[in-house]
Image (tube, helix red, strand yellow):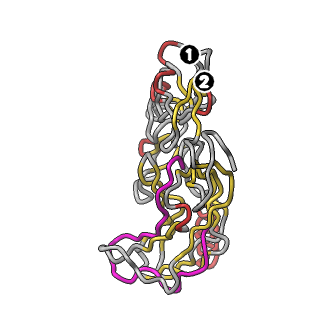
Amino acid sequence: MVGQFTIYLLFLFCLSASHAWNCPPNSQKNNPNLPNDVAYCYCKPGYWGDLTVPGATCMQCPPNTTSTGMSLSSESCHCISFFFGDLQHGETCKPCPNGKFSRPGSRFVTNCTCLNGMDEYGDEFNVTTCLCPANTFRTETYLNMSGLLGGNPISDRGNTIELSLDKKYKNGYIIATTIDTRQLQGRGSGSYSTKYYLRAEDDLGVLDLWSASGSNVNLPRLLLPLPRDRGVGLKRLYLDSSPYQYWSFTGVGGSVSVLGSAVCLACPEGKYSLAGDSS
């Protein structure tokens, strides 16, 4: 009898383990330690919905729009970068004309401007276009960003490692689309509660590209695509950790590459170009 009861308990345990609880589709909990209850679930970025309403689901924002996490209504959806539109008055998000840039949430064509480092030129029909100024050129390429060998932290916090941009791109304006860490080496070392990040900073602020927790974590060796509305004006890539500890990373080396555009790079010494040249 005892043996049968033990088998029954094991059966119940296996049954419960095989039915792990998850939030509804396209939603998540902000903290995994919160109770398994839909009341603690919120829609992911790019979706909206109030899950506290019985039967509600997370609806996807319209094309060329997105939303921040925890959005409760469709009014939270807004146009992504390089698009504009007054969604609250029934408009759709349209691309900015002639290569111009707009920040997320732009509603009017007047919000579309030239990227930093580019100048606006008009023709005889009063049509304006964004072009690289004279003595610069625009290129599409892989931009090498090399990791610091040895993993020595260089920030005043002591737990951050910068992945420094190749000096020939220092004066460029980068529109990044994908971060390639397949040649990155090293690991994060700390307590089981330590969390490690690969972060990027662009014109809109800091973005987490990758994160992991644990006492001994290998750094990512992946292709990491950026969201459609991010990567404009990429300034830096860096490894970070939380909570603070001085030696968070060891053996950092290899390289990280960025796929995207370097807008308006300065011509090499002794070379010249006209406005709008691409090589």
Q: Nearer the viewer, residue 50 or 198?
A: 198
Q: Residue at x 55, y 68 (%)?
A: 166
| Identity of the residue drawn at 61% across and 79% down | 254
Which amino acid type is shown beneath numbered disc 2? Answer: Lys
Report if residue 59 is visible in the image: no
Which picture quadrant has residue 179? bottom right
| Span shown in magenta | 231-256
Callout 2: helix, strand or loop?
A: strand
Count of all numbered marks drawn on residues in the image: 2
Q: Which mark is residue 91?
A: 1
Q: Is residue 223 above or below residue 60?
A: below
Q: Name the mark nearer the viewer: 2 or 1.
A: 2
Contact flag, marks 2 and 1 (Cβ < 8 Å): yes
Q: Position of residue 198 (x, y in %)?
A: 50, 65
Q: Is residue 250 above or below residue 278?
A: below
Residue at the spot of label 2 = 94
